[in-house]
Image (cartoon, rainbow, N blue to C red):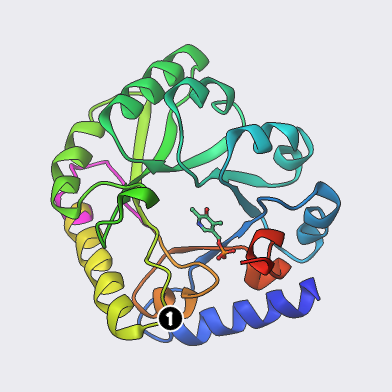
Amino acid sequence: MLEANLRRVRLELAEAAGERYPVPKLVAVTKTHPLEDILPLKDLGVCDVGENRVQELREKLPALAENFQVHLIGRLQSNKVKYIMDTVCMIHSLDRWSLAQEIDRQAGLHGVRMPVLIQVSPAGEPQKGGMPPEEVPDFAARAAKLPGLRVCGLMAVMPDTGDEDVLLPLFRGMRALFERVRDAAPEGAEISELSMGMSGDYRLAARCGATMVRIGSAIFGPRPSQLTR
Ligand SMILES: *Cc1c(COP(=O)(O)O)cnc(C)c1O
């Protein structure tokens, strides 16, 4: 099933990106799934996995980090930053200044420079995390000055709806904001990633220029919490 699902997702991503954009990188979201279900992804050509909780991520180490590039995609408490500095390749959920400062501080202690994405809340849903789009350009400029951070781009979680009329303007708005931040970035800074699109909306995201999609249930099947909903 895993193999067939992956094949379908990859095909649809390529179709949706079309001629206009490169095919986005697939980050397989492995939260709630045990290692024995995750490790087969490696032989199917998946290099990147995403986890949303530090606790669960730590329970799956070191096997997860030995086999994949691990992305932290969920809301991050400042006091947990220290646990992930040596294991994750990118934090997608930088959404406030105090967190930027703590990542910078820990990066200094660990002797690394942490790639981060600024999480945006395109539809103003505070429970999903992210800052209002209008705050992003200033925040990006400030964060780029912290030596422990490498600001690589933006991330967004869209509203749970299948309604294209709602989603399309939000995805297009994110792409426009991404290009604005990228074009304003100082020489040497490389703003190259736009992480958006999940199982319900990755086709639209790819059509609108996502560079990374974060996909869980379309690959693994629904999580237990989704079946009982
Ligand atoms: C769970 C999760 C995903 C993937 O969700 P699916 O709908 O299963 O594809 C993507 N991004 C974040 C931040 C998540 O928490």
Residue at 46 percent of width and 35 percent of height: 76
Name the residue furthest right. 36
Q: Is residue 184 left or right of residue 147?
A: left
In this view of the protein, which residue sits in the foreground, 228 or 88?
228
Callout 1: few (<14), some (14-19), or many (20+) C-alpha neighbours within 10 Å?
few
Snapshot quadrant of residue 115 = top left
Residue 184 in magenta stretch = yes
Picture layout, residue 205 above or below residue 189: below
Q: Which residues are magenta?
A: 182-194
Q: How far across and down, in percent of the image, does residue 33 sit?
A: 75, 53
Q: How far across and down, in percent of the image, does residue 141 sit?
A: 17, 38
Name the residue furthest front. 228
Q: How far across and down, in percent of the image, does residue 129 sit?
A: 36, 47
Picture layout, residue 11 above or below residue 201: below
Q: Which quarter shows the N terminus?
A: bottom right
Picture layout, residue 88 above or below residue 203: above
Snapshot quadrant of residue 46 = bottom right
Taking the image in four quarters, ligand 1 sits in the one at bottom right
Q: Is residue 24 left or right of residue 126?
A: right
Residue at 54 percent of width and 26 percent of height: 85
* Count of numbered circles in the view: 1
Q: Where does label 1 land, which residue? A: 162
Residue at 43 percent of width and 24 percent of height: 78
Q: Is residue 82 left or right of residue 43?
A: left
Residue at 50 percent of width and 87 percent of height: 15
In this view of the protein, which residue sits in the foreground, 34 or 26?
34
In this view of the protein, which residue sits in the foreground, 109 or 199?
199
Q: How far across and down, in percent of the image, does residue 71 sit?
A: 55, 45
- Majority secondary structure in the magenta region: loop
- Residue type indicated by callout 1: Gly
Helix, strand or loop at mark 1: loop
